[in-house]
Image (cartoon, rainbow, N blue to C red):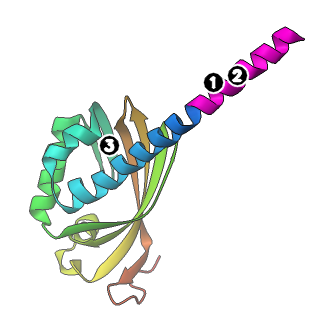
């Protein structure tokens, strides 16, 4: 009986001691997701890629597989060079353990790049979901899912149809 009580007490202490660490860990992962949307994609800060993504990062972007940080830097640079007004607005971020998800609104150049139509720059807003995996405190994989069926004109009126 004493052995069970000691085991239960030890387990309780270990779990409660890890609670704040897990919360802090999830908070830092949420921050990484936010930073990749804001600093990397919206601001074009390529130097932040080294802090946010693992060296062996794999990105599953619409129509493109990106492998490694160097390839990610080239991909972001190409996209932002072609569409300098690229902008993403983070709506929500969820993290649990080694996985996370985000929902963002794509604006301006991001929409033009996704739909391959420069005339849409500034005229349309699209939603996008992303899934993330983390390894050693950095984003190691990302899957991007834009929702091209629910676009809205910048004025807020429906823009795209399914």
Mark 2 neighbour density, 10 Å: few (under 14) some (14–19) many (20 or more): few
- The span from disc 1 to disc 3 (Cα, nearest Å) is 36 Å
In front of the other: label 1 or label 3? 1
Label ID, residue 59: 3
**Viewer-proximal residue, 6 or 133?**
6
**Is residue 43 found left or right of 142 in the rendered image?**
left
Q: Which residue was labeled with disc 2?
A: 11
Q: Quadrant of the N terminus?
A: top right
Question: In terms of sequence position, does the residue under pointer 2 or pointer 3 come before the other?
Answer: 2
Q: Which residue was labeled with disc 1?
A: 14
Callout 2 touching callout 3 (CB < 8 Å): no
Does the rendering let one see residue 14? yes
The question of residue 14 being in magenta is answered with: yes
Q: Residue furthest left?
A: 81
Above or below, comparing residue 97 to residue 157 in the picture: above
The question of residue 151 being in magenta is answered with: no
Please give the range of residues in magenta: 1-17
Q: Quadrant of residue 68?
A: top left
Q: Residue 72 placed where, x, y %?
A: 21, 43
Q: Quadrant of residue 10?
A: top right
- The span from disc 1 to disc 2 (Cα, nearest Å) is 5 Å
Above or below, comparing residue 41 to residue 51 in the picture: below
Q: Residue 105 placed where, x, y %?
A: 37, 69
Callout 1 touching callout 2 (CB < 8 Å): yes
Q: Quadrant of residue 52?
A: top left
């Amino acid at each position: 009986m004493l052995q069970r009580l000691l085991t239960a007490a030890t387990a309780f202490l270990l779990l409660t001691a890890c609670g704040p660490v897990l919360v802090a860990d999830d908070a830092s992962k949420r921050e990484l997701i936010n930073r990749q949307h804001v600093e990397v994609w919206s601001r074009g800060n390529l130097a932040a890629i080294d802090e946010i993504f693992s060296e062996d990062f794999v990105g599953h972007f619409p129509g493109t597989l990106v492998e490694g940080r160097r390839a990610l830097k080239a991909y972001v640079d190409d996209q932002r060079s072609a569409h300098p007004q690229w902008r993403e607005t983070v709506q929500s971020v969820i993290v649990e353990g080694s996985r996370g998800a985000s929902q963002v609104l794509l604006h301006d150049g991001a929409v033009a790049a996704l739909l391959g139509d420069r005339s849409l720059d500034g005229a349309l807003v699209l939603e996008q979901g992303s899934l993330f995996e983390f390894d050693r405190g950095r984003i190691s994989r990302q899957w991007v899912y834009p929702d091209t069926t629910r676009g809205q004109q910048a004025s807020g009126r429906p823009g795209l149809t399914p």
